[in-house]
Image: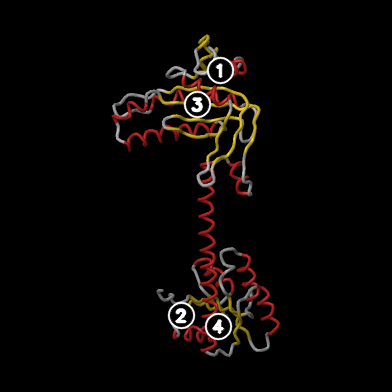
Amino acid sequence: MPPHPPGRVLVVDDHPTVRLMLTLSLQQQGFSVTEASTGAEALRLLHREPFDVVLLDIVMPEMDGHEVLAQMKADAGLRDVPVIVISAQDELDSVVRAIELGAEDHLPKTFEPVLLRARINASLEKKRLRDAQRAFVRELELERERSERLLLNILPGPVAQRLKQGQSVVADSFDDVSVMFADIVSFMPLSTSQSPVQMVRLLNEVFSTFDALAEQHGLEKIKTIGDAYMAVGGLPSPRQGHLEAIAAMALDMIAAIPRFRRADGSSLQLRVGLHVGPVVAGVMGTKKFSYDLWGDTVNVASRMESHGLPGQVQVSQAVYERLKDTFSFESRGLVPIKGMEPTPTYLLRGRR
């Protein structure tokens, strides 16, 4: 371990002879010394330069040592600087008051070099230990913040909070949730013309844009699967207007996607599907958490996307009925849907 650098000591005393004696003694012992003749000057120096220890006379005109000490302890940037008060033999009450104000130690004015060095070194060692402890605590806080950010990137905030509080199983039923699936049309077959790095970079740019839109509209991204994107509205905290919000996000996604280009220069197209209804949502896994949704609402939303048209947002009858007064639609009539009877679907065109 490298040796500690010499401590920086601030000597505060209104008597020049006392300051000189202390300075010479400390410099002979290897300390770096700065002098202040008044309490006000000492505070100015402390705000301007870092010091490891302050030797502070108690009895000084205008601003005495008690006032300097009180101001230091009231200042977050100075309260941890060790202070050793200097006192005459008959100033015991003043010393006691200084200790109560937060002084680290005291020295009589009959300075003994060995005692002076021992007191300062003890204060320096305590300061180093406190500094190391603060650095360790700060590193723990930074690590906790990093872990918190990572958890919030995986799980919705309220769900993550429940896990942190010790809840082992998180599962909820929601009566009214809007579900959106989006898929980049023909992305995987054409991705063979790109390197893996180019493909991942392009997908990251696209999905990062979608993430920003989800946050803008107050919606929750659930996951990405390959080149597909899933988001929901109305959970984990129920909210009014979630279906309107997810419809607006879908239109924004359709508008945003053409600016992204494949390696051959061609633009991307998106196919989006929406449905609304009840779902069950919960956390799966114990090491790699996943927040997911189950139920017919999820299946129908997925079918709305997979049986939709490139560049279009296809929605179910339920979505149409709830949004027909505020959004414009085009009917597709009865559309054959895998696993379902021919189903009336609509293309979302925009706001009215």
Which one is earlier in the sequence, the residue at label 2 or at label 3? 2
Residue with the mark numbered 3: 181
Viewer-proximal residue among 68 and 346: 346
Q: Relative to 75, is 290 above or below?
A: above
Viewed as shown, does residue 109 lie left or right of 255?
Answer: right
Q: Which residue is mark 4?
A: 119
Identify the amino acid type marked 4: Arg
Q: For the N terminus, which image quadrant?
A: bottom left
Query: Residue, x 38% and y 27% (percent of image)?
Result: 259
Residue 31's tag is: 2
Q: Label 2: few (<14), some or many (≥20) within 10 Å?
A: some
C-alpha span from label 1 to label 3 = 13 Å
Who is closer to the viewer here, 171 or 131? 171
Tell me the amino acid under the disc marked 3.
Phe
The mark that comes first in sequence, 4 or 3, is 4
Query: In the picture shown, does residue 135 fall above or below 111?
Result: above
Q: Secondary structure at mark 2?
A: loop
Structural distance between the alpha carbons of marks 4 and 2: 13 Å
Residue 316 numbered mark, or none: 1
Q: Nearer the viewer, residue 157 or 98?
A: 157
N-terminal of the pair, mark 4 or mark 2, is 2
